[in-house]
Amino acid sequence: MHPIASQLLGKTGVGGHHCNPAAAVLLLLLCRGFLPSVAVCPPCCLCTSDIISCSGCNLSTLPFDLPSYATRLDLSHNLLTALPTNWIPQPFDRLITLVINRNSISKIEVNAFNVTPHVLHLDLSSNQMTALNLSLFTGLKELKELLLFDNRIVQIYPGAFSGLHSLQKLYLSGNRLKAFPLGLYWEPGGPHNLTFLDMSYNRLSKVPVQSLLSLTREGRVYLQENPLVCDCALLALLEYWMWKQYRPLVDFKAEYPCRDDSISGLVCSQPDMLDMPLELQTYKEEPGKWLRVPCPGLTSSAEEGQVVFWVTPKAVVNSSTSDPSAHFIVLPNGTLEIRGAVIEDSGTYGCVAARQRHYDPLESVEVNVVVGNLSSASARGLTNRSGTEHFNTAFTTLVSCFISIVLVLLYLYLTPCRCRDSRGGTRGCGGRAWILCSDPREVESGHRRSNGKRVAFLEPQAEDSDICAPKTPAMNLGHVTTEGILKNGSRTVGQTHTDPAHMA
Ligand SMILES: *[C@@H]1O[C@H](CO)[C@@H](O)[C@H](O)[C@H]1NC(C)=O
Ligand SMILES: *[C@@H]1O[C@H](CO)[C@@H](O)[C@H](O)[C@H]1NC(C)=O
Ligand SMILES: *[C@@H]1O[C@H](CO)[C@@H](O)[C@H](O)[C@H]1NC(C)=O
Ligand SMILES: *[C@@H]1O[C@H](CO)[C@@H](O)[C@H](O)[C@H]1NC(C)=O
Ligand SMILES: *[C@@H]1O[C@H](CO)[C@@H](O)[C@H](O)[C@H]1NC(C)=O
Ligand SMILES: *[C@@H]1O[C@H](CO)[C@@H](O)[C@H](O)[C@H]1NC(C)=O
């Protein structure tokens, strides 16, 4: 609030509810003449420099004159039932956080959020929404976090989240959803950067296992406290997540079904499953060839109803598809066949199959696949950088640095003065010397930064000076610099000493 307005109103920004509304309006009218754009803090609200809180004010509509300077607007614990298109009278261009939780909102009109284009956090939790309609949140291009938990959402229509290009975290926990909202991830215009989805405390009985496996890499999906029905595919997924120490599963271990071996009537493991530790294997093949990768631990063909998934770097495939032209084929015994391997197939592959056993953390259900020219030296040499090499580089750098210093000192002390004859007497000595050295410790630790150069800048004489530079400052400088470099590796000391202007 404008300081003059605060004085006139006899209050500071905080504590609007102490203000007599009638007096405020009167003073506001008096002020109007010379303070055109001052907005008053509405009664019951609290206003600071950039926060407006109207929490618990029994509001069923918004005050008409809400100041629009806020970056955070808190409207929680009120009686709002709908957000019509003009629910805020004027645009809130600076608004970053909008909190409207614990109201009774069941209806949000299209374009309701066009007045708040820069909001990053939107909290609509604990309201009465039942369906998320098409384009509900358009206008929120920058939104990163959307809280919709504790509503009554039964249905999410296609395109409900379209336009939320920046959305990273979405909380849909505590609703009544029966279907996993996969469209979120695949629909055009959807939040493709979503890395966190909370679907806990809903009514999901089935989840799309294959799609969830491919989402595991990109982000977290929380599924605890859903009435999930166990089958071998889901069990395989949960075992794999547990083996990967996937956070949603580790944090809520006890709230997932199908976790234990003691699931009555469900036999997902093979009769002759290998019971020895699974070691991380590497399979190599040349480009163009076919490669067979056995699933760690599996020996015989999978039983009826069992599925083996392979999580490859690009896609997830399973054993129940039999497209003979596919690049990846999962054979009935779980072995992955890569037909016509390409270099891009290299990477870590996970075999996801229900094994119904607990894993040692050292065991691996993943394998490495390397596709490349196995006979060429370059394929092997790439990963072969040793510590000795780093040391050698560092040593070479130190030696070359030392030689540079000696050369510069030789130049400074031994060259005769030839300011006038060499440059025609107009440009001075031009005696600039540069020492460029890398810090050996940086080289040693493998961090070669482009700005890791240390520069010593020796300028014995100003550019347009007619007389030769006295050697004394240069000698002091040389002493300091050399000593500094010898002590600290290549720390450079005191380039300001060299500048005659600074010394004057
Ligand atoms: C809101 O309404 C309730 C019930 O009518 C009342 O007890 C409470 O004091 C009101 N709160 C405010 C801030 O007006
Ligand atoms: C979605 O549309 C239905 C039917 O038009 C409406 O009743 C409901 O309030 C809408 N949902 C929201 C959150 O606006
Ligand atoms: C997704 O995130 C990446 C990296 O943070 C960013 O470069 C990209 O623009 C984002 N995509 C969208 C659609 O916002
Ligand atoms: C196996 O893959 C096919 C094709 O991608 C898919 O339609 C099917 O649902 C998958 N099976 C399971 C159990 O996920
Ligand atoms: C899986 O089946 C293929 C073809 O039937 C066979 O070549 C391979 O040896 C089998 N792998 C294992 C681990 O049994
Ligand atoms: C693999 O590398 C070797 C030696 O560099 C070369 O002679 C050979 O032609 C390469 N093979 C392929 C398939 O590129």
Image (cartoon, rainbow, N blue to C red):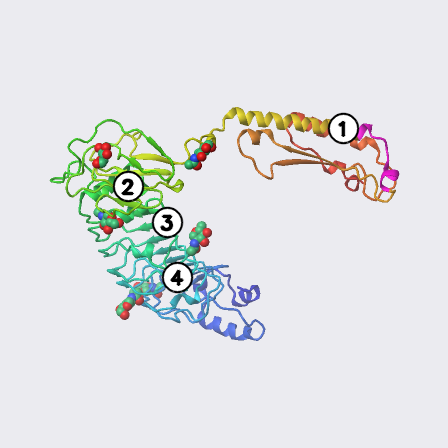
Residue that appears at 21% across and 42% down: 307
Residue on which disc 4 sits: 163
Structural distance between the alpha carbons of marks 3 and 4: 16 Å
Give the crowd class for mark 3: few <14, some 14-19, many >=20 residues within 10 Å. some
Q: Mark 2 points at which residue?
A: 310
Question: Within the magenta stretch, is there residue 34?
Answer: no
- The first of marks 1 and 3 along the sequence is 3
CA gap, disc 4 and disc 1: 65 Å
Q: Taking 207 as reference, is 25 above or below it?
A: below
Mark 4–mark 1 contact, CB under 8 Å? no
Q: How crowded is mark 4: few (under 14 residues within 10 Å), some or many (20 or more)?
A: many
The picture places residue 425, in percent across and down from the top left corner, at 88, 42
C-alpha gap between disc 2 and disc 4 = 33 Å
Numbered disc 2: secondary structure: strand
Callout 1 crowding tier (Cα within 10 Å): few <14, some 14–19, many ≥20: some
Q: Is 152 in front, or is 73?
A: 152
Report the amino acid beneath label 2. Answer: Trp
Residue 223 higher or lower than 280, as above or below? below
Where residue 191 appears, as percent x and y from the top left, is 37, 56
Measured in 3D between alpha carbons, the distance from the residue under mark 1 to the one under mark 3, in whole angstroms, is: 58 Å
State if disc 1 and disc 2 touch (CB < 8 Å): no
Tag 4: amino acid = Gly
Above or below, 489 relative to 332:
above
Tell which circle, 3 or 2, labels the residue nearer the N-terminal end: 3
Residues rendered magenta in the picture: 412-423
